Image: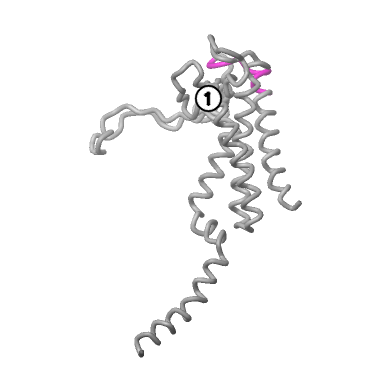
């Protein structure tokens, strides 16, 4: 039952994510009127909703949101099982903790998608049903940079660009988990099949002896 500590981290992410979203929903006005500046104009609390995936990307059909929410549900189940699988395989502890963060973030946003259309009546206008059509609440606004990309940069040079992501606790957990895995993938995944590596090393002398015997023959 030692694997439960990883699921507890996922649960903690979900609880913090939902607590922050509820505080924002019940105590802040949406958009610019309710904006709270934390660090000058660079870091703010800005209540907004996201009807689709990351960066507001949406699926085009009338049932696009339903498909997206259903996909999130399937992905959540898959990630939850993968977390248990990693523990059974005695994977690197860091990898398991990262997957736990990703799982918590995925479930946190899934709660919004499934229930917020009913609880907070924030489903997009014209939705076939409020269930599975809830919009994800975002609140952390980072105004990183806005300007013209230098002309000497290939392809995108000379274009206007704005970098001001708006995200929530769940997004942060997913981002942190993914980034740590990317920077440590060699160390994390090398521990998944240590027995195979040892067997390969053990077989090398035997294979070498067999090859030498064939050459002598």
- Quadrant position of residue 74: top right
Q: Is residue 90 left or right of residue 46?
A: right
Q: Please determine whether, in this image, residue 180 is positioned above or below residue 118.
A: below
Q: Residue furthest right?
A: 1
Q: Residue furthest top?
A: 126
Q: Quadrant of residue 21?
A: top right
Q: Nearer the viewer, residue 69 or 158?
A: 69
Q: Is residue 9 left or right of residue 185?
A: right
Say which residue label 1 marks.
67
| Position of residue 30 measured from the top left corner of the image (x, y, whole percent) | 58, 16
Seen at 46% across and 28% down, the residue is 55
Where is residue 210 drawn, in percent x and y? 43, 82
- Quadrant where the image shows the C terminus: bottom left
Image: 147 above or below 95: above
- Looking at the image, which residue sits at the far bottom? 216
Q: Does the magenta-highlighted stretch encompass residue 25?
A: yes
Residue 122, given in percent of the width and then of the height, sits at 60, 15
Occupied quadrant, residue 121 = top right
Q: Residue drawn at (51%, 46%), measured in percent from left and top?
A: 179
Residue 206 sits above or below residue 103 on the image: below
Badge 1 crowding class, 10 Å Cα cut-off, few under 14, some 14 to 19, many 20 or more, is some
- The residue drawn where x is 47% and y is 24% is 56
Mark 1: secondary structure: helix
Residue at the spot x=59%, y=47% of the render?
98
Q: Which residues are magenta?
A: 23-32
**Does 202 appear in magenta?**
no
Secondary structure character of the magenta stretch overall: helix
Question: Which x, y percent locates residue 213?
Answer: 40, 87
Which residue in the rendered view is the most extreme toward the front? 217
């Amino acid at each position: 039952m030692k694997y439960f500590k990883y699921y507890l981290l996922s649960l903690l992410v979900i609880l913090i994510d939902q607590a922050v979203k509820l505080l924002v929903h019940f105590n802040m006005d949406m958009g610019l009127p309710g904006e709270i500046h934390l660090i000058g104009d660079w870091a703010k609390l800005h209540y907004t909703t996201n009807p689709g995936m990351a960066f507001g990307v949406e699926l085009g059909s009338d049932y696009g949101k339903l498909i997206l929410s259903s996909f999130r549900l399937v992905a959540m189940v898959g990630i939850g099982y993968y977390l248990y699988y990693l523990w059974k395989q005695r994977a690197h502890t860091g990898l398991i903790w990262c997957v736990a963060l990703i799982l918590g973030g995925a479930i946190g946003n899934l709660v919004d998608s499934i229930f917020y259309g009913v609880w907070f009546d924030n489903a997009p206008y014209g939705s076939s049903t409020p269930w599975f059509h809830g919009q994800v609440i975002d609140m952390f606004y980072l105004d990183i940079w806005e300007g013209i990309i230098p002309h000497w940069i290939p392809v995108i040079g000379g274009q206007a660009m704005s970098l001001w992501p708006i995200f929530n606790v769940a997004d942060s957990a997913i981002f942190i988990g993914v980034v740590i895995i990317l920077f440590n993938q060699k160390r994390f995944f090398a521990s998944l099949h240590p027995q195979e590596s040892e067997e390969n090393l053990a077989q090398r002398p035997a294979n070498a002896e067999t090859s030498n015997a064939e050459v002598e023959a």
